Each structure stands twice: as structure tokens, then as C-alpha cells.
Amino acid sequence: MAGSQADNSTLTRRLMLLGGAAAAGGFGYWWHRRQPPTHDQPRLTAAEAFAAARDGGIILVDIRTPQEWRASGVPVGSHQIDMRRGDFMAALQAVAGPDRTVPVALICARGVRSARLTLALAEAGFTNVIDVPEGMLGSAAGPGWIAGNLPVARWQG
């Protein structure tokens, strides 16, 4: 009986260690997926993006989801195109036109999706894609659109 108890406690410790390692690995994957990829495309702060969109210097595209647009509103001067749309490129070109040199700035919640899509659009031949890495809610890049007290409109979807 005593030998069996020792075997069980060793087995239990091993399972706990393996479970902890699996959880740590899962956390690492989760954390990595929430980090924006590095890129050498241009970047704007939220305030710079607002000013450029207001002055007609860029086309500002909010790539978040309709649920996010409802929850926090949308940046004044932006076009809302959910990046998950199957026809995202067609929707983007309907707003920006067929010229792939037009300056298009992307904003999301915290700069992860905008960085990923900035890279994807550059690979697709867009030559003037700009990332707004602080996003609507703020990130390591800055306070974000909302905390920066920039104008937000109710989404009309």
C-alpha cells in the first residue's frame, strides 16, 4: 500500500508538471498571437490619422468587427470594412479606388490586426499602406483614439 501511494504521488506530480508546461505553452501561443508583427510600413498616431483623414490626406479604414463598432463607436472620418469579409479587397477598392498607391491607413482595437493587414496589403501590391498601431483602445504604441479624446461617431450599421 505504501509503495502504491508513493507511485501515485509521483504520478500526480508528473501530471501537474506536464499540465503546467502545457498551460505555459498555451499562454505563450496566446500571447504571441496578440503581438503585432514587426513591419517597416509607415505608422501614424491616432491624432495624426484623424488630422490626415479630416484633411483628405489618407483614407482611414476601421477594420474591426460590427460588434466592436457598436460597442465603442467608430472614428470620425473613417470607413468601416470588417477585415474578415470575403470581399474585403473589393470593398477596400470601392472606397479607395483602383489606384493601389492611394494612402490607406488601417486602425483596429489595439494595433495587432492593423499590423497584420498592413503587411498583407503591402504583399498584395498596395504601396502606401499606413498602420495606426495604437488603435482605438490604446497599446504600447500610445493611448489610442478613444483615450486621446478624438471624435467618435455611433456606427450606423
Image: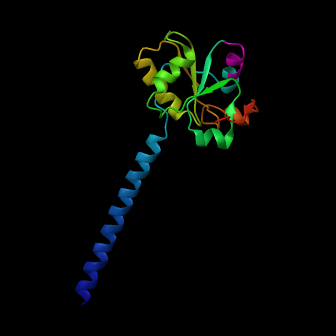
Q: Position of residue 47 (x, y in %)?
A: 70, 24
Q: Position of residue 115 (x, y in %)?
A: 50, 28
Asked whether 9 falls inside the magenta stretch, the response is no
Quarter of the image that includes the C terminus: top right
Residue 149 location in percent, x, y?
76, 33
Pick whichever, 1 or 79, lies toward us: 79
Q: Is residue 153 left or right of residue 84?
A: right
The answer to which image quadrant residue 136 occupies is top right
Q: Residue at x 23, y 85 (%)?
A: 3
Can you see residue 42? Answer: no
Is 53 in the magenta?
A: yes
Q: Is residue 81 visible?
A: yes
Please determine whether, in this image, residue 11 is positioned above or below residue 141: below
Give the residues drawn in magenta, as a range. Answer: 50-56
Whether 41 is drawn above or below 151: the answer is above
- Image point (44%, 47%), residue name: 30
Rendering quarter of residue 9: bottom left
Residue 7 horizontal side relative to residue 91, left or right: left
Residue at 44%, 18% in the rendered image:
122
Question: 153 above or below 11?
Answer: above
- Give the quarter of the figure containing the N terminus: bottom left
Q: Main secondary structure of the magenta part?
A: helix
Q: Residue at x 67, y 26 (%)?
A: 46
Q: How is the image coloured?
A: rainbow
Where is residue 87? Give x, y as percent.
45, 27
